[in-house]
Image (tube, rainbow, N blue to C red):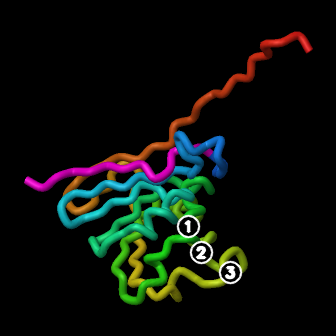
Amino acid sequence: MSSLTVRCWGARGTFPSPGIRFSRYGGDTMCFEVLAGDRRLILDAGTGIKALGDAMDGRETHILLSHGHIDHVVGLTQFAPFWQAGRPIVLWVPEGPPGAAAHLLLEPPLFPVALAEMPASIRVVQYAPDAPCLSQVAFACALFRSIIRVVPTGSG
């Protein structure tokens, strides 16, 4: 039985927050790495994926984007393995407009190099959020809406 390792490379919401004030818990946006045997699954590609890409070994790599919010995809532009010739990478995107976010981000005019022109061997796979399957392992992705309330605590 192979080991399973999960590492958080970023869990901050919406905006990255660099600096000493955020050093205890980190300032990078969503990016989690799951290692199982010789395989790697990266959950979301927030700004944390830059440090992950710089530290990666040669394992097979799958990147699963849960949805297209900018804090979950913006790190793709800084992912070093995209620039490694022939490096096999599978990019899993939600079907429909949410999956389009990664393509929009990695295309001119927002980024100078189109995804198809990057040196890595990148395969894009669309998945249906209600029934995705990654190499015989089923999973579900859902975007939960939350209500944020701002409650005044002072009198001024």
The residue beneath circle 3 is: 108
Residue 70 image-quadrant placement: bottom right
Q: Identity of the amino acid at label 2?
A: Leu
Report the quarter where the C terminus lies: top right
| 75 is higher (above) or lower (below) than 116 | above
Q: Which residues are magenta?
A: 1-13
Residue 151, image x, y percentages: 75, 17
Task: Please tell me which of labels 1 and 3 falls first in the chain.
Answer: 1
Residue 92 image-quadrant placement: bottom left
Neighbourhood count class around disc 1 (C-alpha, 10 Å): few under 14, some 14–19, many 20 upward? many
Quick check: 134 left or right of 102? left
Q: At numbered mark 3, what does the secondary structure look like: helix, strand or loop?
A: loop
Residue 49, image x, y percentages: 49, 62
156 and 125: which one is in front?
156
| Outermost residue to the right | 156
Q: For the point 55% across and 55% down, which residue is it?
A: 72
Residue 76, image x, y percentages: 54, 68
Separation (CA) of disc 1 from disc 2: 6 Å
Q: Identity of the amino acid at label 3?
A: Pro
52 and 111: which one is in front?
52
| 28 is higher (above) or lower (below) than 103 | above
Q: For the point 50% across and 50% down, which residue is it?
A: 10
The residue beneath circle 1 is: 102
Q: Is residue 4 magenta?
A: yes
Q: At numbered mark 2, what does the secondary structure look like: helix, strand or loop?
A: loop
| Outermost residue to the front | 20
Separation (CA) of disc 1 from disc 3: 12 Å
| Outermost residue to the top | 155
Neighbourhood count class around disc 2 (C-alpha, 10 Å): few under 14, some 14–19, many 20 upward? many
Q: Which mark is residue 106?
A: 2
